[in-house]
Amino acid sequence: MNIIKGTNRIAIVGKSYTIKFVRIPFRAAIREVVSIAKNYHKYNWKAAKLAIKLTEFNGPFRGIWANYREWSASAQLGDNVVPTRFSFLDLFNVVETASLLNLPRLKHTYEYPGYGDVHTFREPGNYGWHKGKLKLLDYGSPKVIKYLLENGAQFRRQLDVFGIRHSGKIVGRVLNSKGQIFDAVLKQLKSHFPEIEDPRLWDIEDNETTFAQEVAKMSIRELEQAFIDLVGGRQPVIESSAHFLNGASPLISFLDSLSNSELECIHHFRSAIGRIAVIKSTLQLEERDGILTEERKLQLNNRLSNAFKYKAFIRELMIRWDH
Ligand SMILES: Nc1ncnc2c1ncn2[C@@H]1O[C@H](COP(=O)(O)OP(=O)(O)OP(=O)(O)O)[C@@H](O)[C@H]1O
Ligand SMILES: [Mg+2]
């Protein structure tokens, strides 16, 4: 058994179940209650409701709200979260135990699922392994719940890739030959092409999951081999890049070409996304017009799967292009 203190809850972690007790700082709670009681005569119903609402985000009773929200949202959030099984008046919740991820704090928000636009997502201590999947174990914030309700499937795919990338040894990183990181190159690019989307933040599409997971577990050496396979062969997935294969380090030559030419960079970022859209709509149109033969369908689906490989590869390489 293990006792872990969070800001708002204390977790007593058992083998199968964890109990999350609300942490109420005693003095602050007394002060809050006294202040509400003193001002009681000033309250009408609306003001009282507002006062209670304010304790939701601030003050000593946040833990109660967190337990309340986790208990009410757990079932709806499905396998993105470690399930809450029981709540005693929101004072303590019984949840299934997850084994912690044990990750040092990551530098960049894009490395987290949900891209870290919600504070909870940026804290590795909020994730745990449960029944073979990485899940969120702290989901008491309304922002988290809203995000997960709206982006549940996307978040699940990101969690899987994140789990794979960070469950092994230290994640391999690579720099261009000038020792630059991708952030520097992207900043420069954005000053001329503000509309360009950061590939590290591209959504992971359903059909792309397998490739995204494959590249997430690769070392830099393996990523280089993947690159060689993608640009080489009779039908290269990444076209017009075979000349990189002549140098000693094809992957670094590729990063150099992205750093040296904004057009080259834009070309790869746009075509990785654009190709998927074009093939998908071709499939749709030909099917609608009744001209999609089995052979043609196979051929287009093959190209689509290559396009997904291209996208997943570029995303992963840009994530690893860092210190
Ligand atoms: N289901 C669980 N299985 C294993 N450990 C857990 C579980 N739930 C919580 N913990 C541990 O207890 C800690 C505190 O729980 P949690 O993060 O939910 O509380 P909190 O007070 O809302 O946290 P914070 O300090 O992030 O605001 C977690 O960081 C984790 O280490
Ligand atoms: Mg927490």
Image: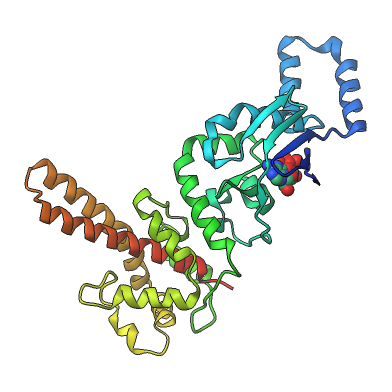
Q: Is residue 143 above or below residue 215?
A: above
Q: Is residue 88 above or below residue 239?
A: above
Q: Residue 254: give x, y in percent of width and height.
A: 39, 78
Q: Residue 191: give x, y in percent of width and height.
A: 46, 64
Determine the residue positioned at 64% across, 61% down: 106
Query: Toward which corner of the image does residue 49 lie, by quadrant?
Result: top right
Q: Is residue 294 left or right of residue 319?
A: left
Q: Is residue 70 above or below residue 315?
A: above
Q: Residue 266: give x, y in percent of width and height.
A: 35, 66
Determine the residue positioned at 59% across, 73% down: 323
Q: Is residue 154 left or right of residue 52?
A: left
For the residue pair 115 and 12, the one nearer the viewer reads as 12
Q: Is residue 290 left or right of residue 193?
A: left
Q: Is residue 219 left or right of residue 288?
A: right
The number of callouts visible is: 0
Residue 255 seen in this snapshot: yes
Residue 191 seen in this snapshot: no
